[in-house]
Image (spheres, rainbow, N blue to C red):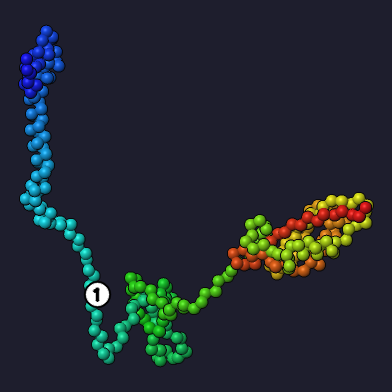
Amino acid sequence: MKLDIIKNTWLDIVFEGRNKIYGAYELRKSNNKTTVKALIIGSIIFSFAVAAPLIASFLPDSGEDEVDNNVKIATVKLPPKKEEVKPNQPPPPPPPPKVDQVKFTKPVVAKAEEVTEDPPKIEELKDKKVGSETIKGDPDAVLTVDEPVGTGPVSQVVEEDNSVYNTAGIEVKPDFPGGMDKFYKFVGNNYKTPEEEGLKGKVYVTFVVEKDGSLTDIKVLRDIGYGTGAEAIRVLKKCPKWTPGEQNGKKVRVLYSLPITIQSAE
């Protein structure tokens, strides 16, 4: 028997004696219709996708007809009108003073019949200025200054910085001429060790390097006796001037500490 696989007759042979109510039989039986339907729908979608640019070219362009409703209005300030100055015109009168002004009449010794004007009374001078003529004041008038404020240089009082800085937070540390090695050498050459056998230890000294480089406020924090602290003060007092420290571009006072190691000859 020759079978045609395109038709559904082969399904009856395959499912002969089997349960045809089973879903596989119905799916295979309607497979041809489903395939044709899917082919038609796919062809329509493909045709529409290909023809979409052509259809869009026939549609009117709505962007050209759009009207920009965002209108910005800017106010323009016109320049003030220039007032024409008429030639040979007298200057305008000065504004009335804020306070009433009473003419002051200089008292003159004269005969009663020769007096032409009485001086103002004390009540009339209350809350008023005294001038060469009587002027009615305007309480709403703006006060005017006769002389303009000068624009010359203003001298500023700069407070001198006399505070003592620490070497740890200073911008430019003080330095001995030639470097600190020469300073230690200067102290070692000038320090006279007491003639005591077995003398050994350290002398701790602090001093302030002033703005002019001199050493002041020399203090011995700790010594080992036998005049070791006093000798350290003597050496530092004859020390040459240092290069002073600086902070913010200005010379300042700086506190410096110095340990001196003492070891006598055995």
Residue drawn where x is 39% and y is 86% of the image: 117
Q: Quadrant of residue 66?
A: bottom left
Residue drawn where x is 33% and y is 70% of the image: 140
Vertical side of 222 occupied by 208: above or below: below
Residue drawn where x is 12% and y is 42% of the image: 49
**Which residue in the structure is indicated by mark 1?**
79
The residue sitting at the front extreme is 1
In front: 154, or 266? 266
In front: 44, or 93? 44
Q: Amino acid at mark 1?
A: Pro
Relative placement, left or right, of 249 versus 101 is: right
Residue drawn where x is 23% and y is 78% of the image: 81
Residue 176 lies, in percent from the top left, at: 73, 65
Vertical side of 236 occupied by 40: above or below: above
Residue 133 lies, in percent from the top left, at: 38, 83
Q: Quadrant of residue 138?
A: bottom left
Relative placement, left or right, of 237 versus 107 is: right
Give the position of the N terminus as an image quadrant: top left
Q: Secondary structure at mark 1?
A: loop
In front: 178, or 196? 178
Vertical side of 242 occupied by 144: above or below: below
Q: Quadrant of residue 102?
A: bottom left
Near mark 1 (Cα within 10 A), the count class, few <14, some 14-19 or many ≥20, is: few
